[in-house]
Image: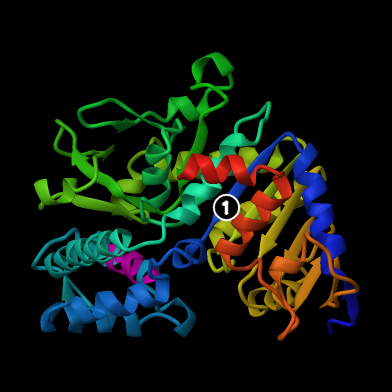
Amino acid sequence: MADYVHDPLRELTEIRNQLSYTKRLGFLFGAGTSKAMGISDINALTKKIEESLDATNKAFFSTVKASLDADQQHIEAILNQIRLIRQITSDKKAKVYEGITGEDAKKLDKTICDSIYKIISTEEEGANVSIARKFISWLNWMSRDFVKEIFTTNYDMILEKSFENLLIPFYDGFVGSFEPFFAHETLDSKSRFDKPPVSWIRIWKLHGSLGWFWKLNEDKKTYRVIRLSSGAKDKYPDSELVIYPSRDKYESSRKQPFTSYFDRLKESLISGEGIFIISGYSFSDEHVNEVIFNGLNQNNRLHIIAFFYADEPLDNLVKHTKNVPNFTLIGPTKASISGMYGKWTLAKDGELVDPFWDKTNSKLKLGDFKELVNFLILSSGLKDKIDTHVK
């Protein structure tokens, strides 16, 4: 029962103050951040993919989808199940699982990934990228002694395009110019001299990217992940897109981005004092959740602030006693602050809260990534500089 009362002005003022002095700053973005810019979230993407399939593949897709629990009937869980079938059948036509041959599963996997690429690439063309550009410009202006990191479960390349549009250096673990390859040692090294400059913002894509592809090595047995430029899929139509860990390839080597990125997330959350901001993430990925809560439990100098578009995910976390003191959960009508779960009640107006408070419905709007970016910029006092930079 949310019977405690929280004042949004007081809490937003506290967050602004923390941002002004914290040395370490990190972010985790989920589908909601891309949705705010016009990219389909996982449920909409699942529906669009299913509609894009021909009759044969749609039948296989429906079989796999029906085999999953209701809360797992989304494209990532479906792809994971298809890849399990591929692993069991070794991609062979003669081997069958639940009426799907290994060859059918392999074709379905590639067809789905091709569809993901086409759908999101098309949506990127009409996306509101000004939101991402404003955020990146703000983050670049934030002076820090430590690396600034962005972790994201999104496949789209809006952030990368925004970095390049603004001419701001960033790093994602890939090196090279012809077919950039993932160099895991640049993440593993403890020496600052083995890494790119601290001023380069890091971006770690936990579930893959539209720019990543599997390339067969010369031994014809193992694969490596390469990063290609925008539109490369059209030049390499037979290449497999790296979307969500493919079990056989992923388990063959610990030198793939997924493993290194998750290790980097763990390290980031347990390394001393810092603020970690979460937006657009509904806490539906248990692998990510485990890393987050381990970090909260192991590092009492870590403060995580999660912004929710709706109250339901927040309610679920509180119900499972996940509202620990160093974890602030901010929803539209409720919040959990210092472990105290309650409702928002605006005590008085203020410049910091007025733009983000819906007076008609008594709701805080910071669960919308666009509004969160505006809040971060307003809190920094850098609005004029950022507007000029983005323009």
Q: Position of residue 384 (x, y in %)?
A: 61, 44
The kind of secondary structure the magenta stretch mainly shows is: helix
Q: Position of residue 358 (x, y in %)?
A: 70, 78
Residue 79 covered by magenta stretch: yes
- Name the residue at 90% across, 74% down: 347
- The answer to whether any part of residue 107 appears in the image is yes
Residue 282 covered by magenta stretch: no
Q: Is residue 96 rendered to the left or right of residue 37?
A: left
- Name the residue at 75% across, 77% down: 319
Q: Quadrant of residue 375?
A: bottom right
Q: Position of residue 322 (x, y in %)?
A: 75, 66
Mark 1 is surrounded, within 10 Å at the Cα level, by few (under 14), some (14 to 19) or many (20 or more) other residues, namely many
Q: Position of residue 386 (x, y in %)?
A: 57, 43
Q: Which residue is mark 1?
A: 28
Q: Is residue 106 above or below residue 387?
A: below
Depth check: give the residue in front, 303 or 6. Answer: 6
Looking at the rendering, the stretch of residues picked out in magenta corresponds to 77-84
- Name the residue at 56% across, 56% down: 288
Q: Is residue 31 rendered to the left or right of residue 379?
A: left
